[in-house]
Image (spheres, rainbow, N blue to C red):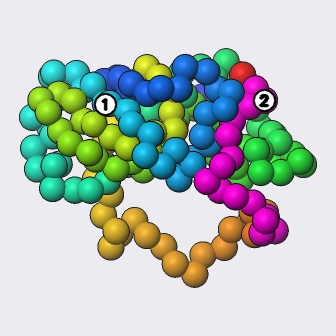
């Protein structure tokens, strides 16, 4: 099967205190209070209209330090291999990351955010408002993570396994 190609525009950069993968939080919940800044390309500033009325946004970005994908990985919260699509590993075929972050304030083309779990200078692909009526799900299944009862989700940090 031939792979189709698509083109995405980088609409900005995400500035964070994380410059290496090691010891970086693996999810926004583990980065509680960590500050970052989305620097939106000035071309897209009009798209920020009314965003200040939301508390959180969903940020899509490129996992730009990923060198090659892996279809099976050992995720941070386990010791056995899992299929890439059953994990949140960054070694994805399309190198797309997604995080829900809190808006601190918006000034011009800058969105000051909290709970950042992405590497500094991650290329920004899109921003969507988080809307709790649509984005929360209850009574869901957690797959292999349901056996991880003694994990402390607030303290999981990245290591070098996904360089």
The residue to which callout 1 is attached is: 38
| Image x and y of residue 62, in percent | 48, 28
Left or right relative to 100: residue 37? left
Is there CB contact under 8 Å for labels 2 and 1? no
Q: Residue, x 74% and y 31% (percent of image)? A: 159
Q: Residue furthest toward the right?
A: 80
Q: Residue, x 16% and y 49% (percent of image)? A: 52
| Quarter of the image where one finds residue 24 | top right
Q: Residue furthest toward the bottom?
A: 139
Q: Name the residue nearer the viewer: 153 or 130.
A: 153
Query: What quarter of the picture does the N terminus occupy?
Result: top right
Mark 2 vs 1, N-terminal side:
1
Q: What's the magenta region?
A: 147-162
The residue to which callout 2 is attached is: 161
Q: Name the residue nearer the viewer: 2 or 18.
A: 18
The answer to whether one can see residue 45 in this image is: no
Q: Residue, x 15% and y 56% (percent of image)? A: 53
Query: What quarter of the picture does the C terminus occupy?
Result: top right
Q: Name the residue nearer the viewer: 145 or 115.
A: 115
| Image x and y of residue 49, in percent | 10, 44
């Amino acid at each position: 099967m031939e792979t189709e190609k698509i083109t995405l525009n980088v609409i900005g950069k995400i500035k964070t205190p994380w410059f290496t993968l090691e010891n970086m939080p693996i999810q926004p919940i583990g980065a509680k209070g960590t500050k970052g800044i989305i620097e939106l390309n000035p071309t897209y500033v009009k798209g920020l209209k009314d965003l200040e009325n939301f508390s959180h946004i969903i940020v899509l970005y490129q996992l730009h330090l990923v060198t090659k994908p892996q279809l099976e990985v050992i995720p941070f919260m386990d010791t056995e291999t899992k299929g890439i699509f059953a994990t949140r590993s960054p070694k994805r075929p399309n190198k797309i990351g997604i995080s829900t972050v809190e808006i601190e304030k918006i000034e011009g083309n800058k969105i000051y955010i909290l709970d950042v779990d992405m590497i500094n200078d991650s290329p920004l692909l899109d921003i969507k408002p988080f809307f709790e009526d649509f984005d929360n799900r209850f009574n869901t299944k957690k797959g292999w993570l349901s056996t991880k009862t003694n994990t402390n989700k607030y303290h999981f940090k990245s290591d070098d396994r996904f360089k």
